[in-house]
Image (cartoon, helix red, strand yellow):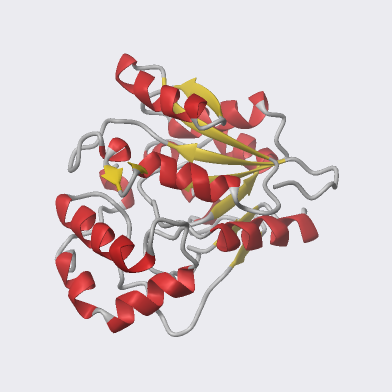
Amino acid sequence: MTTGDQLHVVAVIQARTGSTRFPRKVLHQLADRSVLEWCIRAAKSAYGVDEVLVATTVAAADDEVAEIAERSGVGVYRGSEDDVLERFIGAAEATKADAVVRLTSDCPLLDPVLISQVAQLWRSNSSLEYVSTTLSRSFPRGLDVELASTAALRSIGETAKGYHRTHVTSALYAEGSSYRRLGLSTEPDLSHFRVTLDTVEDAQAIAELVRFLGNVPPAWEQVANVLLTQPHISQLNALVRQKQLDEG
């Protein structure tokens, strides 16, 4: 949903079928649609986002990802399988974005209002180069929203190596980085909860959450409330280890 100002903000959803722990997880069915379609629906509902784009790879295995995006009425950008930073820079340039909101397709319970807040914070101070809910983690993992200016992405694209090219934004908040940043946080700390999809156990927990929340993009507060009042849900994936940045 657009704001009418001159700044162009594009939500870019990172999606591919390759996954070491849960192959084809973005196509996993949750209620009546795929996990990817949950992400697209949330992004399209966010205020302050002018355009939604799915950034996938040139691999034939990801043709289905592109088809879902097109069927959902959003754009598609196809780029490198491994250099995800290059994919995002290409997507930003293809859409003439001033900034991109980075969303990942393994986070089906994204809150459109949280996406809107990140976009609006940047619009109110576009000298910022990075706005995120993850700088100091306090939201449940899987509700992550990151915004980076296109200029900042181009800047790190000139020098970033290794996992910084896989994780797109990590060079913007790495130790010693001087990029202008702003983080959103909440109290109490809920970062021990996990609503991202990387394993079968995650899928079980998310499906149980949806049983309580319904087939709509939930507010993050609703997600937190169910997790706090229904402890059996978080137990389903409590032993899942989050991969480190250098693990891909």
Q: Residue at x 41, y 80 (%)?
A: 189
When the figure is inspected, residue 80 is found, relative to residue 10, above or below; the finding is above
Q: Position of residue 171 (x, y in %)?
A: 50, 48
Residue at 71%, 59% (x, y): give it. Answer: 120
The quarter holding residue 166 reads top left
**From the viewer's perspective, is 1 left or right of 54?**
right
From this view, report whether residue 94 is shown above or below residue 168: above
Image coords of residue 65 (percent x, y): 39, 27
Q: Nearer the viewer, residue 177 or 173?
A: 173
Q: Is residue 187 visible?
A: yes
List x then y, in percent, for residue 24. 25, 34
Q: Seen in the image, is 231 located left or right of residue 77?
A: left
In this rendering, the answer to whether 231 lies above or below 82 is below
Give the residue furthest to the right: 5
Residue 70 appears at what percent x and percent y? 51, 25
Q: Kindly identify the residue that appears in the image at 30 percent across and 83 percent down.
A: 229
Q: Nearer the viewer, residue 147 or 152?
A: 147
Viewed as shown, does residue 69 lie left or right of 206? right
